[in-house]
Amino acid sequence: MKKYIIPLAALAALSAQAADPNDGVVVPDSTGFTFTDVTLVPTGSVKDQNKSGTCWCFATTSFMEDEIRRKTGREVDLSEMFTVRHCYADKADRYVRMYGEANFGAGGSAVDVNYVWDRYGMMPEEAYAGLNYGEPKHDHYELDAALTAYVKAISSKPGKKISTAWRKGLEGVLDAYMGPVPETFTYQGKTYTPRSFADAMGLDMNDYVALTSFTHHPFYKPFVLEVADNWLWAPYYNVPLDELKATVDNALKKGYSVVWAADVSEGGFKWREGYALMPKEKDQADMDGTELSRWVQLSDNDRDKAQFDIHGPVPEIEVTPELRQEMFDRQETTDDHGMVIVGIATDQEGNRYYKVKNSWDTNQLYNGYFYVSEPYFLAKTLSIMLNKEAIPAATAKALSLK
C-alpha cells in the first residue's frame, strides 16, 4: 500500500465531511444510511497504525489472529512491528542489491506477513511493540526518512563498492527506533523464540493464497501483480471478477475473514461516515426545473463535489471487467490501503455491502468499521488474501488448488 495511511491535507478534508463543526463527531442520523449486519466473522479489537504506512501488516495480522481464533479458539494479540521491522531490513537488502532501482518504503502487501512468518517466525504484541522512540503510538515519518536516506546513500556507492558495515548500520537505526528483537521471550508462563511461537499458533502459511482479477493476464494462472509495494514480486492468482466476489461471499458465509487491498482515493470513500460507494455520475438529461437551472450554473469543481454529496443510498455504477481494467491501466485505481472484510450487510433499501475492519483507530461513526458497497468492491479491489479452504470448489479446481 501507499507509504502513509493518507496525506495530512486529505485527512483533514475527510475529517470534515458530514461532521458537526463544534466537535468533529459524525452525527449518525446525518448519513442517511441504516446498515444491518447479515453475516459476521468473529474478530479482535480495532488497532491504530497511526502515522505509519503499515496498513498491509495491520490488516494481515488481524486476519491471522482471526485464523488462530477460528482454528484453536485462542485470542492472541500479535506484533505488527515484528513483521514490519523484518520487512524494512529485507527491503533494504533488495534495494541495495538492485543498485537503488527498486521500491523502498513503508508500504507492503498481505503476503509480506506470510513471508516473515515462514522466514523469521512471529511474536506477541506484549513481547515486541516496536515503540522505542518516545511516542505512545506509531509514528514512522522520521524513521522512514532516515531509512530511505540511508539506503540511497549506500546504493550510490560513494566508496566505489559496498562496505561490509552497512547492514550493521541499518540494524542500528532499526534498533534505535523499534528496539532490538529479543531472541527469546516469555508469554503466558512459557519461554519461546519467534520461531517456536509462530509454530505454536497452529497456522500453515501454505494455506493462504492471494487472488486478483484483471484482464491483461490469463485467468486461472498466477502473475506478479504490477504494483510498487509488491516488493517480493509475489504471484497472485487471477480469476474472473464474478468469481473474485463469489470467493469473498463464500469465505464470509463459512466463517473466514478476508484481507482486502483496495483504492481508497475515490470521492465516495467516506470512512468517517461509515461507507464507501461508487455513485453514478449526475446527468443533466435526467434533471429539470430548479435542479437543472442550478446544475448548469455550477463550476466543474462544484459539480465534482455534488457528485459525492451523499445522504443515503444512491444509484451506483455498473462495474464490468473492462471498466475495472481501464481504471487500473489509467491508474485511477491505485494500491492505497489494506483492510479486513469481516461481514456482509444490507442497507435500508436492500443493497448489499461488505463490512470492513480498518486500522485507523475507533474515532469514527462505526468505531473502526465501515461498509463497502458491492460496486465499490468490484471496481476498486486490488487483491484479496484468504485461506484456500474458503475458495469455492470450482474456482479452487480451476486454480489447481484442489
Image (tube, helix red, strand yellow):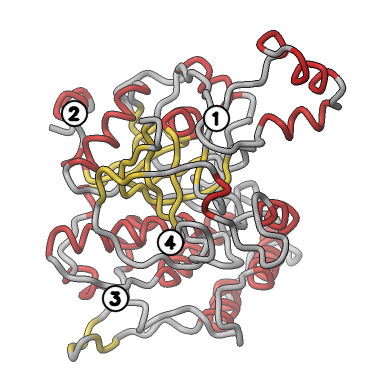
Q: Dot 2 surroundings within 10 Å: few (below 14), some, or many (20 or more)?
A: few
In this picture, residue 359 sits left or right of residue 255? right
Q: Are marks 3 and 4 in contact (CB under 8 Å)?
A: no
Q: As shown in the figure, which amino acid type bears the numbered disc 2?
A: Ser
* Residue mark closest to the camera, 1 vs 3: 1
Residue 51 point in image, percent of width and height: 61, 67
In this picture, residue 358 sits left or right of residue 252? right
Residue 84 point in image, percent of width and height: 47, 66
In this picture, residue 201 sits left or right of residue 82? left
Q: Can see residue 96?
A: no
- Residue at x 45% of width, y 71% of height: 81
* Residue mark closest to the camera, 4 vs 2: 4
In three-dimensional space, the C-alpha distance between marks 1 and 4, rounded to whole angstroms, equals: 26 Å
Q: Which residue, given by chain and number where applicable, does mark 3 sit on?
A: 194
Upstream in the sequence, badge 4 or badge 2? 4
In three-dimensional space, the C-alpha distance between marks 4 and 2, rounded to whole angstroms, equals: 30 Å
Q: Which residue, given by chain and number where applicable, does mark 2 sit on?
A: 400
Q: Dot 1 surroundings within 10 Å: few (below 14), some, or many (20 or more)?
A: many
- Residue at x 26% of width, y 80% of height: 193
In three-dimensional space, the C-alpha distance between marks 2 and 1, rounded to whole angstroms, equals: 34 Å
Residue 268 point in image, percent of width and height: 59, 37
Quadrant of residue 389 within the rendered picture: top left
- Residue at x 16% of width, y 26% of height: 397
Q: Are marks 2 and 1 in contact (CB under 8 Å)?
A: no
Taking depth in this image into account, of 285 and 158 the one nearest to the observer is 285
Upstream in the sequence, badge 3 or badge 4? 4
Q: Which residue, given by chain and number where applicable, does mark 1 sit on?
A: 278
